Amino acid sequence: MIAIGEASRRSGVGIETIRYYEREGIVPKPERASNNRRLYSEHDVGRLRFLKKCRDLGFPLADAKTLLNLSECDREDCRSVKELAEIHITNIRAKIDELGRLEAALSELTVNCDSGNVSCPLLSQLRIS
């Protein structure tokens, strides 16, 4: 059994994030030592690593928790995992499209900055009329 600092180091998940996951019921509360310090098993660290990988892939926390629960079932439900991943891919593509539109809009506005105007065209476009 290891302390929270070591669990954080081994999993790559910050101490405050681990505490948050416990408060929110995303991971179960760990055992406690006689001095009331949290004690984590290798299984607990594995769960934290799993959640970190999900978050690194951009999964919302609720989906990461669902994936964690699915990974710990006696019978893994590959169809449910695939559905979650496909929804996530759709959301990522929508964000990419939105970022492309934002880039084009900002590029258009910054082109006007090269003209040497005394007043900034970009700020003029952003001001409330």
Image: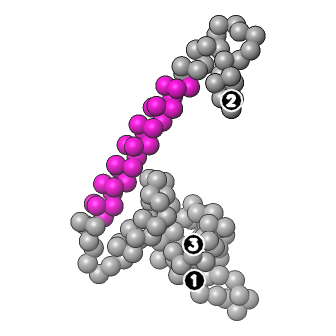
Q: Residue furthest top?
A: 116
* Image coords of residue 50 (percent x, y): 45, 65
- Residue 94 is tagged as none
- In the image, which residues are magenta? 81-106
* Image coords of residue 33 (percent x, y): 67, 88
- Residue 129 is tagged as 2
Secondary structure beneath label 1: loop
* 111 displayed left or right of 127: left
Q: Can residue 91 be found in the magenta stretch?
A: yes
Name the one closer to the observer, 42 or 87. 87
Residue at the disc numbered 3? 21
Residue at the disc numbered 1? 29
Label total for image: 3
Give the residue drawn at x 45%, y 70%: 65
Give the residue drawn at x 69%, y 24%: 123
* 105 displayed left or right of 91: right
Q: Tell which tag, 2 or 3, sits nearer the viewer.
A: 2
Q: Main secondary structure of the magenta part?
A: helix
Tell me, yes or no, whether the two marked residues, 2 and 1, touch with CB atoms within 8 Å: no
Circle 2: residue type: Ser
Vertical comparison of 22 with 33: above or below: above
Q: Which image quarter: residue 87? A: bottom left
Vertical comparison of 106 with 19: above or below: above
Circle 1: residue type: Lys
Residue density around tag 2, few if under 14, some if 14–19, many if 20 or more, within 10 Å? few
